[in-house]
Image (cartoon, rainbow, N blue to C red):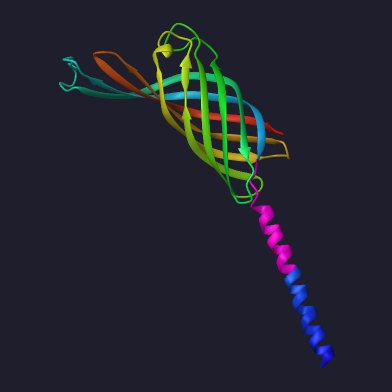
Amino acid sequence: MKKLVVAIVGSVLVSQGAFAQGQSMSMQLEKPAIKGFYVGADYMNLTDIKVKATAFGGAYFRATGTNESKSEGGTHVGMAGVRLGYIHPSPTKFAIGGGVRLIESFNRSEWGDSKVQIVMPEANLIYSFTEKVNTYGGINYAKFTGSSAANEFKPQLGLQAGLGMKFTRAISANAGYTMMGETIEDDRVKMEFVISGFNTNVNYSF
């Protein structure tokens, strides 16, 4: 009887040890794909622009006969620069990150007489499918400068989302879509812009 009790207790301890090991492995797999400070190279190709114009103060739009007009079309502004930020470590599959992009157009902008620069703070919620693959989504606040038209833009909240891949402990890459909100307003009309396009970046975490 004593041997039977010892055998049962030993079996329970072994099973508890295996369960604890499994739980430990599970928690390890739930760590975010990337964490800590990062610096990276960023590329963005702005391909779409939507405009909503609202007239006031007695002005009107001849084309529509109303005080509001909407349009959308294509643009093409290739931009590149750097991104800096921090992703807060988390024991779960979710993490929170924030940073800033500093990018400039390759050539003179279609919107003005010189190159365009963008300073864009951003914040993201990140979900890690595995230790290698994650998805993210968040908000941004893009300040345009450079050309005469871009200098008139007043930043509004924008959105971004995409997928990320971790290649090594320190090297990762993202691919996604970014939408930036801007307005131009005077005493006659308010123009609201949504400027968007695809972006990619490669990052080094430390």
Tell me if residue 109 comes above or below residue 36 in the rendering: above
**Horizontal and vertical percent position of residue 173:** 63, 35
On the image, which quarter does residue 37 sit in? top right
Could you say which is closer to the camera, residue 100 or residue 108? 100
Q: Residue at x 68, y 62 (%)?
A: 23
Could you say which is closer to the camera, residue 121 or residue 46? 121
Q: Residue at x 75, y 78 (%)?
A: 12
The stretch of residues the image draws in magenta is 18-34
Residue at the outermost top position? 113
Q: Please identify the quadrant where the N terminus is shown.
A: bottom right
On the image, which quarter does residue 26 sit in? bottom right
Could you say which is closer to the camera, residue 14 or residue 62? 14
Tell me if residue 144 comes above or below residue 7 in the rendering: above
**Horizontal and vertical percent position of residue 145:** 48, 13
Q: Please identify the quadrant where the C terminus is shown.
A: top right
Q: Residue at x 20, y 18 (%)?
A: 56
**Horizontal and vertical percent position of residue 123:** 52, 34
Say left or right for 15 vs 142: right
How many numbered marks have been drawn onto this rendered protein structure?
0
**Horizontal and vertical percent position of residue 110:** 43, 12
Residue at the outermost bottom position? 1
Could you say which is closer to the camera, residue 27 or residue 161? 27
Magenta-drawn stretch contains 5: no
Q: Main secondary structure of the magenta part?
A: helix
Say left or right for 76 vs 40: left
Tell me if residue 138 comes above or below residue 147 in the rendering: below
